[in-house]
Image: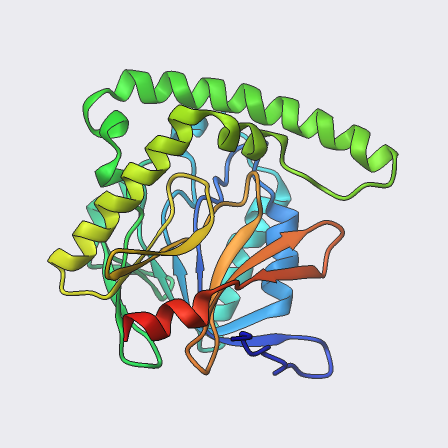
Amino acid sequence: MKTPENDVQNAAGTKHYRALFVSDLHLGTKACQAEAFLDFLRVCEASRIYLVGDIFDFWRIKRGVYWPQSHNDVLQKLLRKVRKGTDVVFIPGNHDEAMRDYCGMRFGGVAIVRNIIHVGADGRRYLVMHGDEFDVVVRYARWLALFGDWSYTLALWANTHFNVIRRFFGLRYWSLSAYLKQKVKRAVNYIGEFETALASEARRHGAQGVICGHIHHAAMRQVGDVIYINTGDWVESCTAVAETEEGVFEIIRWTHPPYDMTKDREGLVEELEAAA
């Protein structure tokens, strides 16, 4: 069964969604794809935007402040959307966990919560959370997580230089670090265990689905009787999740140059219907 296309757009090419879910922007780091995210926000509008954790990277900021104008522009763009009526919800992750002290409060119209239930257009309930609570490394071996963060930074550095060469030959952006991650068996096993744990948490909340971030791996699949959706990230793959007005969920992959947007929807409608 073919997934229907969402062709709702105005003369400026803006695409309208019922909800957008983004995570792992990591503002405050050189790896943050802030310019690409700004292009995404210029094209994509939604009644509600969920910021699903690690929007800021306080781990990196503590080691030295890096905050270019584009990172300010991202915050200003989000706040302008709030002023125009968009409901923005921020769910802190492990890299911006200091913001968890402010859960239950609003800043600039942005609601800060630990997790939240999103009710889809079809009435299905989705638990929205960052997901680090179910990462054993983060919970019980923080020093190892910090070491992994350093190694990951090195991989992203290599990724940046790799793409400079690709652009020289007229090729579009491609994530070397994400590709390597998928080729490491232990990483693949870890992702599978993470998905299973998040699906169990969704069941505990009486939800039929879970929407999360944290592991920088966009995905949309059925895990038992739960629909598992991961938003991916904006340091490697530049991905987000959108719910159309008809209630169809999509993974949006934002590639370079700007305004080149593709959607990964394979099997989603079939999965949702099978779960009904």
Quadrant location, the C terminus: bottom left
Q: Indicate the quadrant where residue 176 lies.
A: top right
Find residue 253 and report its horizontal and vertical position in percent. 59, 55
Q: Decide which of 116, 99 is in the foreground and name it.
A: 116
Q: Decide which of 256, 28 is in the foreground and name it.
A: 256
From the viewer's perspective, is residue 266 above or below residue 191?
Answer: below
From the viewer's perspective, is residue 27 above or below residue 177?
Answer: below
Q: Decide which of 19, 120 is in the foreground and name it.
A: 120
Find residue 208 and report its horizontal and vertical position in percent. 23, 66
Find residue 256 and report its horizontal and vertical position in percent. 72, 49
Color style of the picture:
rainbow
- In-image side of 145 versus 36 (left or right): left
Q: Indicate the quadrant where residue 260 lies.
A: bottom right
- In-image side of 2 versus 117 (left or right): right
Tally the marks: 0
Can residue 96 be spotted in the picture? no
Can residue 101 be spotted in the picture? yes
Residue at 27 percent of width and 80 percent of height: 123
From the viewer's perspective, is residue 2 above or below residue 94?
Answer: below
**What residue occupies the far right of the structure in this picture?**
169
Residue at 24 percent of width and 52 percent of height: 199
Find residue 206 and report its horizontal and vertical position in percent. 14, 65
Residue at 19 percent of width and 24 percent of height: 140
